[in-house]
Image (tube, grey):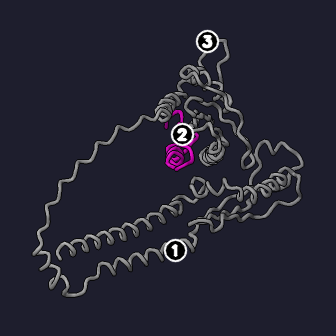
Amino acid sequence: MGEVILALQRGRRTIIAMLLFSACLTTLIYLISIRPIFGKMDFTNSEVVEFVLSDNFQKNTQPVFAELRAYNAGLRSSAPSDIHVGSGAQGALAVVIHYRLEERSPTEAELQLSGLPSKLYAYKPEIDIQLVNRPLLITATFLLVELCLLGYTLFTPPGLEERYVRPALDDYLLPPAADPEPPPLDAAPAVDATAALVVEVAALLRRFDLFARELQVRRAPRAAMTFEDEYDVQDALRPMLRLHYDDVLLEEPNPSFAGGWSRGDFLLKDHGVIIEAKMTRVGLKDAELGAQLLVAIGRYQANADCKHLVFLVYDPKRLLKNPAVIKKDFEDQRWAIPVTVVISPTP
């Protein structure tokens, strides 16, 4: 009798543990599925990035973006209206982006053109991430059923323990439990060659500002190298990389995405590491730089050669207000490919 009671108690404990595990797992899975709703409501949010990269978003926004560009170029007489695009209730979250049409000032290049409309416009995105009702109701239903079963399993009729269970167990001698075997020692973690190379490349790129300043020192009357844009940065970065690595290749331009083109400047072929250079200027500061990095990440996710993406942001005049925030925001996100951001000179 005592052996039967022990077996029933072990089974009861197993059921309780399974119900608790199931309830915790259900809650955890749902929280993971809605994790982006607790992040920033901007284009660094993984849920927003996934939606922006979708065919549905491209299909709904590209024609309107093209109309706005045509209007700003003086090719249309009327500007398009606001845009509302949403991902729909396909998962636990739904992304809704409202592109609000706002007047903007013309750039210096546009001021020199004729035939432009009297007012120029740009779209300002307003992003909202919402919970989808159906997954929430399903999760709540599963949790309710699991908690009801747990309560039923924990319930014991009054007096049953004292009258029958305890006396039967007192008469039964439990065998001593065997000592558990010690767990095996964990194997040493494998060395990630790509990650080690990225650390080495990042350390080299952090010294790019020193390298660039040395290139600008020449014996008179010879002309020194100047850095005006990203092409100058690429020209200086190429010999710097080839001094240290034998597999440096120039990347071809990536396909068009969201109305623009990009080129991956250099590829370390043996390890799949792509290095792309950016240079700050008056019109390219924190927000604009973040948008360019976001678009570049979206392109490289479809590049089979890219296993790790490294951005060199050359900021010689220290125009970035929050370089540490930019670096943290992009490196902490779970992209399809790992991303490293190196800002030189180091803030």
Residue 104 is at least partly visible in this image: yes
Q: Amino acid at mark 3?
A: Arg
Say which of marks 3 and 1 sits in front. Answer: 1
Q: Which residue does the image show at 81% across and 45% down from the upper left?
A: 111
Vertical comparison of 323 with 316: above or below: below
Left or right of residue 8, residue 210 in this image = right
Cα distance, mark 3 to mark 1?
74 Å
The foreground one among 126 and 24 is: 24
Q: Amino acid at mark 1?
A: Ile
Looking at the rendering, the stretch of residues picked out in magenta corresponds to 319-347
The residue identified by callout 2 is 341
The residue identified by callout 3 is 219
Q: Residues within 10 Å of mark 3 (few under 14, many from 20)?
A: few
Secondary element at tag 2: strand
The foreground one among 149 and 40 is: 149
Left or right of residue 197, residue 12 in this image = left
- Which of the two discs, 3 and 1, labels the residue nearer the N terminus? 1
The foreground one among 267 and 79 is: 267
- Which of the two discs, 2 and 1, labels the residue nearer the N terminus? 1
Cα distance, mark 2 to mark 1?
40 Å
Cα distance, mark 2 to mark 3?
34 Å
Q: Which residue does the image show at 29% across and 73% down from the upper left?
A: 12
Q: Residues within 10 Å of mark 1 (few under 14, many from 20)?
A: few
Secondary element at tag 1: helix
- Which of the two discs, 2 and 3, labels the residue nearer the N terminus? 3
Q: Which residue does the image show at 63% across and 42% down from the upper left?
A: 300
